[in-house]
Image (cartoon, rainbow, N blue to C red):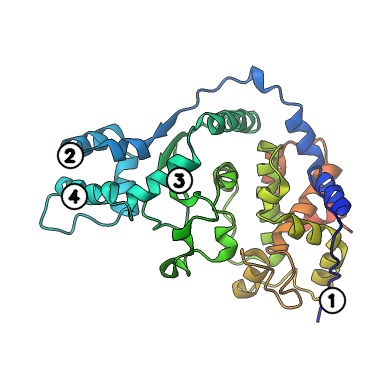
Amino acid sequence: MIKIINKAPSLLLLLLITLFFSHCTDGTKDESEAIDTDKIKIKLKFTRFDEAIFNAKNPQEIADLENQYPDFYPVYMYQLMGDITQTDQSALEAAANLMRNFTTVPEFGLGLKHRADSIFPSFEPFKKELTEAMKRYSYFFPADTIPEFITFISPLRINFPIIEGKNQIGIGLDMYLGSDYKPYHSFQLADQFPAYRVRKMRKEYLLRDLITAMCVNKLKPIETKTRLLDEMIYEGKIACMVKAILPQTPDSIIMGYTPSQIAWATENESEIWAALVDSKVLYITEPDEIRHYINDAPFTTAKGFGSGTAPRIGSFTGLQIMAKYMAKNPSLTLQQILMENDADLILNKSKYKP
């Protein structure tokens, strides 16, 4: 059994850990803070499809939406809302009937819309934050096109609140209605929305999830036959990118941790690393074993960890390794760092020994 020190952190320790953790990406953090975003000009396109679909009152207005959103409409109507073409009605009639039910029943879509309007009474603050993030994104990836952002509401049917298309990103507002939103806790949705996930289904996570989805697309897809170390470095790269683009976002949000989980992971960092090395799990390749260190859960489910530990400890350690690697190689740009796919080289050059 791997023994991990588990102490109850004091308030002072929590503060010190937060300050330490916020500077974990030395090179990129400094670079991102030095960016003069006032000199970066972008045109943010932010569209409220959720409002448009709830304002459509008849088949003709539904048809107009299909013309206005030629790329997003079929994804929304035929994938998120379900297959509505297998009926005796025309596709348009079926869509109109489906949307009439969805947008007028209080226990269905109308209730979701009312809750979304209360959680997001104005999108101006979010658009301001998103614009700043996209300026930073443009700084690091100047060749990329800034996508159009489209808000939508679906019937709590999808597990991925951010969907991506060609130069478009859809944002499912129904996935950010607050941890206290009663439908999230219903018996029927218990398997889809476990408590550790519901905790993060709030607006504070919206921008983080959005930027994370964009950052994942910047990395070369990881091979199917990989080692735990490869997965850890991959996860660490994603977290470093997100922190570079959202430098003011709390680390609890970046990692999806509670303050006490960050405190635990940081205080026990050396013991965690020793446990990974001593148990010789860095080079395991069995997917079922690797996911215990990487997948989200109430805690890290790998052997020797368990209740009371922070989840995704492999991802946390990957971030620490990448932070050390970036600090040891300050001349490398973020793009150069992302292009290095040799996990062993990154680990060796990071000289990571907490």
- Which of the two residues, 314 or 143, is positioned nearer the viewer here? 314
Number of numbered labels in the structure image: 4
For marks 1 and 3, give the CA distance.
41 Å
Using the image, determine if residue 354 lies above or below residue 218: below
Q: Is residue 85 left or right of residue 155?
A: left
Circle 1 residue: 3
Which label sits in the foreground, 1 or 3? 3
At numbered mark 2, what does the secondary structure look like: helix, strand or loop? loop
- The answer to whether residue 292 shows anywhere in this view is yes
Circle 2 residue: 58
For marks 2 and 4, give the CA distance.
9 Å
- Amino acid found under the numbered disc labelled 4: Asn
- Which of the two residues, 50 or 43, is positioned nearer the viewer here? 50
Q: Is residue 200 left or right of residue 70?
A: right
Residue drawn at x 41%, y 32% is 47
Q: Quadrant of the N terminus?
A: bottom right
Circle 3 residue: 173
For marks 2 and 1, give the CA distance.
63 Å
Q: Position of residue 275 (x, y in %)?
A: 82, 71
Image quadrant assignment for residue 310: bottom right
Circle 4 residue: 97
- The answer to whether residue 341 shows anywhere in this view is no
Residue found at the very far bottom of the displayed protein = 1
Image quadrant assignment for residue 56: top left
Residue found at the very far top of the displayed protein = 39
Which label sits in the foreground, 2 or 1? 2
- Amino acid found under the numbered disc labelled 3: Leu
- Which of the two residues, 190 or 231, is positioned nearer the viewer here? 190
Query: CB atoms at circles 4 and 1 under 8 Å apart?
Result: no
